[in-house]
């Protein structure tokens, strides 16, 4: 039994529709057992084919992998059919990991991922550029979540075909360099992706040319800019 986070992404053109109908959607989804902490959000970046990715996200606590997959299937069905009729573009299920050692390894399309919220505000353009340059060395990209209570840059480090120990070592190297450069690591979120229906929505942001297991590390001016939201 583990704790999970689920993301169901919709078409960017439907974001306002989601905002307008979120209360009704919440009522409908309240009938599904074990759906907790339901919220709407969006990720915003300066690069990629999907620079703005609106979604709902929720948690399933202390359940089996098969249970969370069935719950996700039911939630997706409600969203995709009347009266909502959302265009579902991606579904992700991630198992939440603590800071403890894990004898885990990911293969095939599973992955380890970490997110670090950097500070409690959006830094100056020059500091953001410095932050992005550090992150790119590790194949890490930045995003903003404008629906968050505290809007600040969030890192995304995703690795396939690796062990937890190797992944956390790389994550810690990034953290140490950020701290050495006076960046505050306000919050950290570590997870293992067990299902992703459409990784290609991250094309051009985390990877390029369809090679989703190879992170982008090249510098370009657009990646060094603060996203507009």
Image: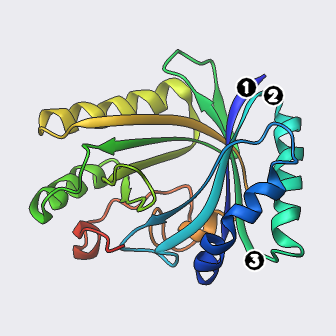
Q: Where is residue 21 in the image (x, y as percent from the top left)?
A: 69, 71
Q: Is residue 99 left or right of residue 36?
A: left
Mark 2 to mark 1 CA distance (whole Å) = 5 Å
Residue 212 lies, with reference to residue 173, above or below; the image says: below
- Specify the label residue 2 is tagged with: 1
Residue 172 lies, with reference to residue 86, above or below; the image says: above
Q: In this view, does 55 lie to the left or right of 206?
A: right
| Residue in the foreground of this view, choosing between 216 and 24 | 24
Which residue corresponds to the image point at 86% horizontal and 75% vertical from the top-left? 83
Q: Where is residue 61 in the image (x, y as percent from the top left)?
A: 72, 29
Q: Can residue 176 be seen in this view?
A: yes
Which residue corresponds to the image point at 40% horizontal and 50% vertical from the top-left? 149
| Residue in the foreground of this view, choosing between 220 and 27 | 27
Q: In this view, does 116 lie to the left or right of 12?
A: left
| Classed neighbour count for the residue bearing mark 1: other residues with Cα under 10 Å, few (<14), some (14–19), many (≥20) | few
Residue 209 lies, with reference to residue 132, above or below; the image says: below
Residues tagged 1 and 3 counted as in contact (Cβ below 8 A):
no
Displayed quadrant of residue 172: top left
Q: Where is residue 218 in the image (x, y as percent from the top left)?
A: 30, 65
Mark 1 to mark 3 CA distance (whole Å) = 29 Å
Q: Which of marks 2 and 1 is nearer the N terminus?
A: 1
Image quarter of the N terminus: top right
Residues tagged 2 and 1 counted as in contact (Cβ below 8 A):
yes
Which residue corresponds to the image point at 33% horizontal and 54% vertical from the top-left? 151
Disc 2 marks which residue?
63
Q: Can residue 197 be seen in this view?
A: no
Disc 3 marks which residue?
87
Give the secondary structure at mark 1: strand
Which residue corresponds to the image point at 87% horizontal and 54% vertical from the top-left? 73
Residues tagged 3 and 2 counted as in contact (Cβ below 8 A):
no
């Amino acid at each position: 039994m583990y704790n999970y986070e689920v993301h169901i992404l919709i078409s960017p053109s439907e974001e306002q529709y989601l905002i307008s109908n979120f209360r009704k959607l919440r009522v409908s989804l309240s009938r599904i057992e074990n759906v907790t902490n339901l919220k709407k959000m969006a990720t915003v970046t300066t690069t990629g084919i999907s620079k703005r990715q609106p979604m709902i996200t929720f948690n399933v606590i202390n359940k089996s992998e098969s249970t969370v997959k069935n719950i996700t299937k039911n939630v997706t069905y409600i969203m995709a059919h009347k009266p909502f009729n959302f265009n579902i573009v991606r579904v992700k299920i991630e198992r939440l990991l603590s800071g403890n050692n894990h004898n885990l390894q990911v293969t095939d399309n599973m992955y380890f991922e970490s997110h670090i919220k950097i500070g409690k505000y959006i830094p100056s353009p020059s500091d953001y550029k410095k932050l992005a340059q550090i992150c790119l060395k590790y194949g890490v990209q930045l995003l903003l979540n404008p629906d968050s209570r505290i809007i600040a840059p969030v890192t995304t480090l995703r690795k396939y075909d690796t062990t937890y120990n190797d992944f956390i070592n790389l994550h810690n190297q990034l953290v140490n360099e950020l701290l050495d450069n006076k960046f505050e690591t306000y919050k950290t979120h570590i997870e293992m992706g067990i299902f992703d229906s459409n990784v290609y929505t991250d094309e051009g942001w985390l990877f390029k040319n369809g090679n989703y297991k190879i992170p982008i590390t090249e510098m370009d001016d657009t990646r060094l800019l603060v996203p507009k939201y």
